[in-house]
Amino acid sequence: MSGSDSQEDKALVAIKAALDKTSVSTKRKVVEKFVLAALGSIPWVGGFVSAAASLKVDQRNTEKDSLQTKWLEEHSKKMNQLMGALTEVAARLDNLGDTLDERIQSDEYLGLVRSAFRTWDRAETEDKRRYVANLVSNAAGTRLCSDDIVGLFIDWLGLYHETHFAVMREIYRNPGATRFEIWEGLYGAPTREDSAEADLYKLLIRDLSTGGVIRQERETTTDGRFLRKRPVRNRKLSNSTMESAFEDSKPYVLTELGKQFVHYTMNEVVSRVGS
């Protein structure tokens, strides 16, 4: 057995001991596979467990302000967060029913778990880490879309900032909102057009539009094909100013892909797409 495998085994034992103290009592083998997949995706976990064990052995020879001690103190906070996330997701998996055991143990699902927890480890905010946990849980029990699309959602969680997610939530709550109404719902009165805040807001809308998350609302045919907009002829003199970052006539909605992303990651916003 390699040193890396040994470290992962030690980490697994530590996490399993924590899970044993929770209400998770069934699906033990299923939960263990999920936990091992998550642990194996985070490089520092094995090193943390080994360093903690060696520190206990050599405690008399270790200065309290040593680099190893400081590293352990910093990572112990993240380890507690990781254990909390794993316990929460394991409890959800425990409640899904035996019919989904095969899905949870499949290579496809465990691959998503590894990718998701790598994103969890790099997440800057607690909200983003919560979205990862939601996604992993819902990917086990909900099959609205393929695993390839779930993998895309994991990429989105790594790519987008919390301010992007705030815009998504606002559009989900108020479909058809204009840029003015989205900003007003998030921040109140608009700022100056030449401000850094206005530049950032235009960037957020552009990122989400080109990324396929949001779009301007358009009419469709009965078979779902988008209708072209008829050009509006304005005989008045053209306006001398550029279009506002807070334009108030073009409504925005989530794309169908954007709605599925919200469903999989933001359970506190929506319990089911279209509900």
Image: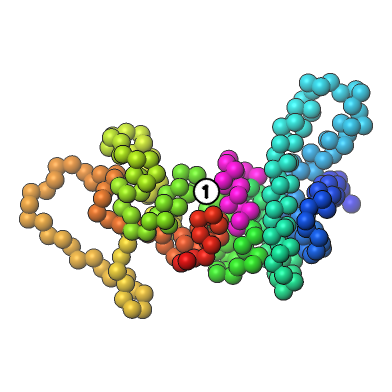
Q: Is residue 59 above or below residue 271?
A: above
Picture layout, residue 217 above or below residue 53: below
For residue 219, what is the image quadrant? bottom left
The extreme bottom residue here reads: 223
Residue 236: give x, y in percent of width and height. 7, 52
Residue found 80% across the figure and 64% down from its top: 26
Indicate left or right for 41 with 126 as reference. Answer: right
SS at circle 1: helix
**Residue type highlighted by circle 1:** Leu
Q: Which residues are magenta?
A: 121-135
- State the residue in front, 58 or 132: 132
Badge 1 is on which residue? 159
Q: Residue at x 27, y 37 (%)?
A: 193
Does residue 203 show up? no
Looking at the picture, tell me which residue is in the foreground, 274 or 237. Answer: 274
In this rendering, the answer to whether 63 lies above or below 165 is: above
